[in-house]
Amino acid sequence: MIPYGRQDISKADIDAVVEVLRSAFLTQGPAVPAFERVLAERCGVPHAIAVNSATSALHIACLALGVGPGDVVWTSPITFVASANCARYCGADVDFVDIDARTYNMSAAALRSKLERASAAGRLPKLVIPVHMTGQSPDMAEIRAMADQYGVRVVEDASHSVGGTYRDQPIGNCRFSDITVFSFHPVKIITTGEGGMLMTRDGGLAERLRRLRAHGITREPAHMTRPAEGEWYYEQVELGYNYRMTDIQAALGLSQASRLDAFLARRRALAARYDTLLHDLPLTLPYQMPGGCSAWHLYVVRLQQDRVRRTRAEVFRDLRARGIGVNVHYIPVPRQPYYADLGFDAARWPEAERYYEEAISIPLHAGLTDAEQDRVVAALGDALRGP
Ligand SMILES: *Cc1c(COP(=O)(O)O)cnc(C)c1O
């Protein structure tokens, strides 16, 4: 089976991990801050906080921005469930903003009209979490302008887009958001096994995020409520978590980060090749906004239902039977039983529903060969034609 995504681990990656295993620190050593520095520099942002997953990152991002019971957080319906769950962890309510028909990112137009209605009803969200679907940035400048107008905070879920650019600047520089979150799950652009990172320009937020990552404990005398009782002294000043990344993971992340440009180049070359090879099939291919560069986490094709006589499920089943590890990203979050039980009716997000009926993610990862890609293209052609 050719998987839709998978990690690419080199000898150098393995050596970097083994070196940590032989060293004094498996966690809370030098590799974590080194990994944070490398990505902060790459993104052109002063603060980076590594954690044990993007899910943890989203959770403490919400907490640090003051999300709690009675608040509402908005995200996209076409995302992994973690983008919405983070608000629920904080006791807040969730709502969804429909996607743009071309980019599959949160629609700026839908956000504008929803903000107008929410403002009139006196129920504005505390926070919006736009998602960089497939590795392409949402229209962050527009989203930020609207958020500022209504006094709403912004967290970018950039789990798909480490290394991408928006308006010719690195994603993660937080020019248009309070916090940007990356994921290092093995199917993402670079991996640490499990892992995530928060980027921010705000020193106060960074301090708070570091504390929430480690039990709510501070060792900074300036942040303590009482005088130190000795050199052993530390204070837990709020309720935090153990969301730390290990040095074993960070060493892998550092080594992977040194290969990031090679990964991106390969993903871009494969995406461009798909664009050419799939051009004549009855598919809608990924649309790219000008001025930015996707990190190409996913290559999503949509069946043109007026030109294909088979359903998405039939095409999907056929591709799997032919050894092509296709997937669907994503089932709209409001369709999940947990959210449906909270009263969500997915029909309220019609663009997300249309997308979901037609979308298939085909294999795209740095280790995919041209020959494997040719097999995917041939299988897709056969599957669309049907028996
Ligand atoms: C992968 C992913 C997450 C969760 O990342 P983890 O590191 O696995 O916790 C969150 N949001 C999106 C959009 C993702 O793709």
Image (cartoon, rainbow, N blue to C red):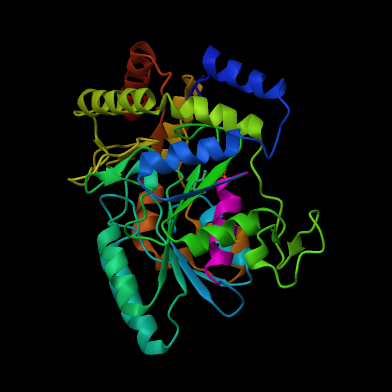
| Residue at (63% x, 22% y) in the render | 17
- Pinpoint residue 218: horizontal percent, then vertical percent: 69, 59
The one nearer the camera, 235 or 18, is: 235
Left or right: 88 in relation to 351:
right
Residue 162 visible to an observer of this rendering: yes
* Nearer to me, 102 or 258: 258
Give me the residue at 22% from left, 44% from top.
Answer: 168
Asked whether, in this view, residue 40 is left or right of residue 102, the answer is right
- At a point 64% along the width and 54% down the height, the residue shown is 213
On the image, which quarter does residue 354 sit in?
bottom left
Asked if the magenta segment contains residue 62, the reply would be yes
> Which span is picked out in magenta?
52-66
Q: Quadrant of the C terminus?
A: top left
Residue at x 41%, y 23% (from the top left corner): 366
Q: Position of residue 273 (x, y in %)?
A: 25, 23
Asked whether 228 or 244 is in front, the reply is: 228
Position in image of residue 147 (x %, y %): 34, 71
